[in-house]
Amino acid sequence: MDRVSNMCTVHIVAPSEASREFVQNTRITKKKLRELHGAMVDLVALMNQPQRDQALLAEAGISLDRALFPLLVGIERFGPIGVVDLSDRAGRDYTTVSRQVAKLESLGLIERRPSPADRRIHEAVITDKGRQMTDALDAARQRLAAPVLAKWSEEDFSDLVRLMRRFVDDLMTPSSGTDKT
């Protein structure tokens, strides 16, 4: 949570000079930015609740260590992926992620292969067994989200998806006025 909260703080609460100028020249107010930051912090807090992970695993009918399943999902979404990149995305220590990836491999959920670009790097790739598990998690996530989203119009939901994607893409773009060094 600290990693994502810090990201929100850097990008929203304490923007760069270029970002400050942009904010001053638009209708985006400090109050609205604060509300956005607050909503993001609330979302991260919700997403990091252990009971939510347990509920998702139970709904999917899966028995897997809670620390492993976000890595499995990350490998499925972003793989083939090296452990360094995976640990950066997860906001976890490299050595911890390396051990957890080894555990996923021992369970037959992923395999590690040399990278075609750099044979020194071993990338994690999801196996068929791992994909079955992430498919079950996706289906469970949809079932758990259905009651919340049932109140939303199709247009509102489409807008949420579109705007979230745009927001994340803009945050990830180096030209967004942030310096990641």
Image: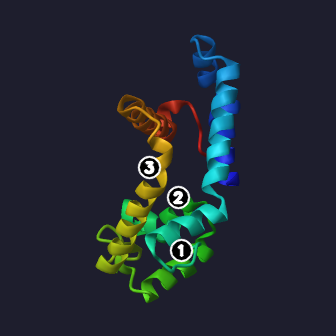
- The disc label shown at residue 146, or none: 3
- The disc label shown at residue 13, or none: none
The residues bearing labels 1 and 3 have C-alpha atoms spaced at a distance of 25 Å
Where disc 2 sits, the SS reads: helix
Q: Residues within 10 Å of mark 1 (few under 14, many from 20)?
A: some
- The disc label shown at residue 89, or none: 2
Q: Residues within 10 Å of mark 3 (few under 14, many from 20)?
A: few
Q: What kind of residue is marked 3?
A: Ala
Where disc 3 sits, the SS reads: helix
Where 79 sits versus 157, above or below? Answer: below
The residues bearing labels 2 and 1 have C-alpha atoms spaced at a distance of 14 Å
Asked if marks 2 and 1 touch (Cβ < 8 Å), the reply is no
- Image x and y of residue 164, in percent: 46, 37
> Label 1, on which residue?
68
Name the side, left or right, on which 140 lies relative to 128: right
Where 126 sits versus 158, above or below? Answer: below
Q: Earlier in the sequence, mark 3 or mark 2?
A: 2
